[in-house]
Amino acid sequence: MLELFTELTGNALLGMIINSLIPLVFVIPLALFFVWLERKVSAHMQDRLGPMITGSHGWLQTFADVLKLLQKEDIIPADADRKLFTIAPILVFAGSYAAFAAIPFSSAYIGSEIDMGIFYVVAVSGLVVAGILMAGWSSNNKYSLLGAMRSVAQIISYEIPTVLVILSIVVLAGTLNLLKISEMQTAYFWNWFIFGGPEPGLIKFLLIPFMFAGFLILYISSLAEVNRTPFDIPEAESELVAGYHTEYSGMKFAMFFLSEYANMFVVSAIVSAVFFGGYQSPFGYLGNSLGISWLVPIEQFFWFTAKGIFFVFVQMWLRWTLPRLRVDQLMAVCWKYLIPYSFVNLIIIAFLELYR
Amino acid sequence: MMSSYFKNTWEGLYTVFVGMKITLKHLFTPSVTIQYPNVKVPLPERVRNRLYVNMDDCIGCDQCARACPVSCIEIETVKSLPTENLGTTSNGKKKALWVTKFDIDIAKCCYCQLCVFPCPTECIYMTDVYEFSEFRRSDLVYKFATLTEAEAEEKKLNFENLQKEKELQKAAQAAAQNNAQQPN
């Protein structure tokens, strides 16, 4: 895609800028949609209706909310560290947006096809942690600081099982490149890594239970990484007002909000890329059977979005099902359960791959 | 030790799925929300809400005002002239009084319905209207009297004139009687 844009504009820099803006065009409407979806899902799970007035079934509600946030006064507390306070939301959003660079949207579009793909995504998500800690520290507010510290402790802890599970996929795939990992799981859904990967044989069937375990571990720890219930103690309303973004208002708050929902989509896209074939269709392509080659990337984009939205929906579903974990329980789940399980899982998968 | 560890893991996972099943069921149950300003819950038959007075039937007997525990009803009446015909109420009672003032201060009303029972013509009753908020408390004083102020003044004047005429007549009569008795 980058070459195409460079050719079209005749300028390498301009092409690069256009190439890097595509995910933004994708992610902002998606985040607005997710905010609306969250409210509708929560409402219907509690036998309510949620927003109904603004547009049909309230679909314009988030647009109205964003308009309101744009008009709000940008308040910086008197005792806050002004510089860090301003940088923090930008850093958080940059961190979650940068992750989109290595995620393949379809076989035709990936921001940057680097061989370090998945490693880059995990690493750049670390920027979010720095941003959150920055926000909590600079707010000069006990709730913000407590929320930020909880968040950092949680994200750093849960990064370990995440990375271990991703590592087990890397062992199977032999590459860190997300585009190649997605490309491997082509054709039918039994080629997805959740069903043991593309290579047929006995080992594929032996792998299936371990892949399911790996998926559960990855999904649980990715929930913790985006601060979603049951791991939402960093922004536990009943304890900490709103956690690290207590002091934020207006556009800065909107940036935190946007990056939170963008992050939800990033982790869902990672889960679907490593286990559920990424942008691959579960059963062939209409474009292939009709012989229209340009239809295939569009279909792939559809499947990518659909899978991402489905996993985000499951995150919301879990949010309205489970109560919040206590701090010690949170750490126990990670260090006593997820990390040992993911280690054993990794070793077994590595052995199975070795004796394939 | 080890078995309880695995049991914990299993129970943790299993109970999450049980919970998810329950919330999924609720996702598809019809919601209980009533979209209030657009949809209204039907009220029970004997609800007590805003008072209404059907002035065509009111005979100005003041019984409702006396029954009111918070004195929110104010009634003023003027006797009609013998020549005037005020008509009858729907249950056949003859009207004899002009109701010059019938004010209900609904802000004071306690919705006890005690004013409704004494009414001989059943002209005061509670309706099912419950949305009547106002920005000023004075706007909550409902005036039911059908006569305009000028008309009410006129009726009062008429009655006073009648009284005066009667008194004059009485005085004249008394004088005439006195005159008639004197020669004796």
Image: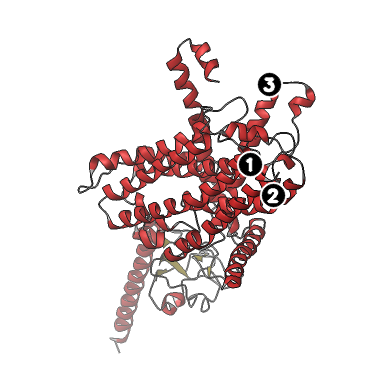
Disc 2 to disc 1, C-alpha distance:
10 Å
> Which quadrant does the C terminus of chain A fall into?
top right
> Which quadrant does the N terminus of chain A fall into?
top right
Q: Which residue is mark 2?
A: A207
Q: Which residue is mark 3?
A: A294
Q: Is residue B66 above or below residue B17?
A: below
Disc 3 to disc 1, C-alpha distance:
31 Å
Q: Is residue B176 left or right of residue A278?
A: left
User: Sequence-wise, which precedes: disc 2 or disc 3?
Assistant: 2
Q: Residue furthest front?
A: A355
Q: Position of residue A76 (x, y in %)?
A: 25, 44
Badge 2: few (under 14), some or many (20 or more) residues near its Cα, within 10 Å? many
Disc 2 to disc 3, C-alpha distance:
35 Å
Badge 3: few (under 14), some or many (20 or more) residues near its Cα, within 10 Å? few
Say which of marks 3 and 1 sits in front: 1
Question: Is the residue under label 1 in contact with that under label 2 (CB below 8 Å)?
Answer: yes
- Residue found at x 66% / y 61%: B21
Question: Is the residue under label 1 in contact with that under label 3 (CB below 8 Å)?
Answer: no
Q: Amino acid at mark 1?
A: Leu
Secondary structure at numbered mark 1:
helix
Q: Which residue is mark 1?
A: A172
Q: Position of residue A241 (x, y in %)?
A: 36, 58
Q: Is residue A223 left or right of residue A284?
A: left
Secondary structure at numbered mark 2:
helix
